[in-house]
Image: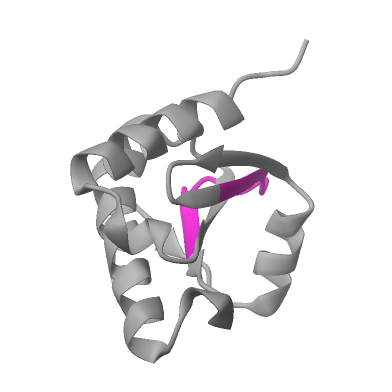
Amino acid sequence: MTLPGLTVLKRRADYLAAQRGRAVHGEGFTLRARRSGGEDIRVGFTCSKKVGNAVARNRAKRRLREAARLVLPDHGKPGWDYVLIGHKERTASVPFDRLRASLTEAVNRVGQDRS
């Protein structure tokens, strides 16, 4: 799978490293992010079995993938890893415009330096 301008996380170690990063809760998802030290914007998607059967999990990940494709090239920071975690029922039911706006807000919040 290719997302223009983005590199997709594939290794478990990358997901575990992102788990130790900052968390921001959006409408229908949780965004985990951390600096990776590389030059690319890297993104991963996950949904636990709590989300539902394979059909429900795949639908949730497809929606998150499309939102990330539209938002991260413009708002994501190079050198950061982003992991989008789908939520039970909410990821599939939130209108896509709100999901996209919520992701934009979450990416901007997680990228702010803490003072």
Image quarter of residue 70: top left
Identity of the residue drawn at 57% across and 77% down: 50
Q: Is residue 26 above or below residue 19?
A: above
- Front residue of this view, candidates 47 and 50: 50
Is residue 35 part of the magenta span, yes or no?
yes
Image coordinates of residue 20 in percent, x first then y, are: 79, 52
Is residue 95 part of the magenta span, yes or no?
no
Image coordinates of residue 9 in percent, x first then y, are: 52, 68
Quadrant (top left, top right, bottom left, bottom right) of the N terminus: bottom left
Identity of the residue drawn at 49% across and 74% down: 51
Image coordinates of residue 32 in percent, x first then y, are: 62, 49
Image quarter of residue 8: bottom left
Identity of the residue drawn at 38% across and 35% down: 102
Residue 38 appears anywhere in the view = yes
Identify the magenta region: 31-44
Colour convention of the picture = one colour
Q: Is residue 44 above or below residue 49?
A: above
Q: Is residue 93 above or below residue 55?
A: above
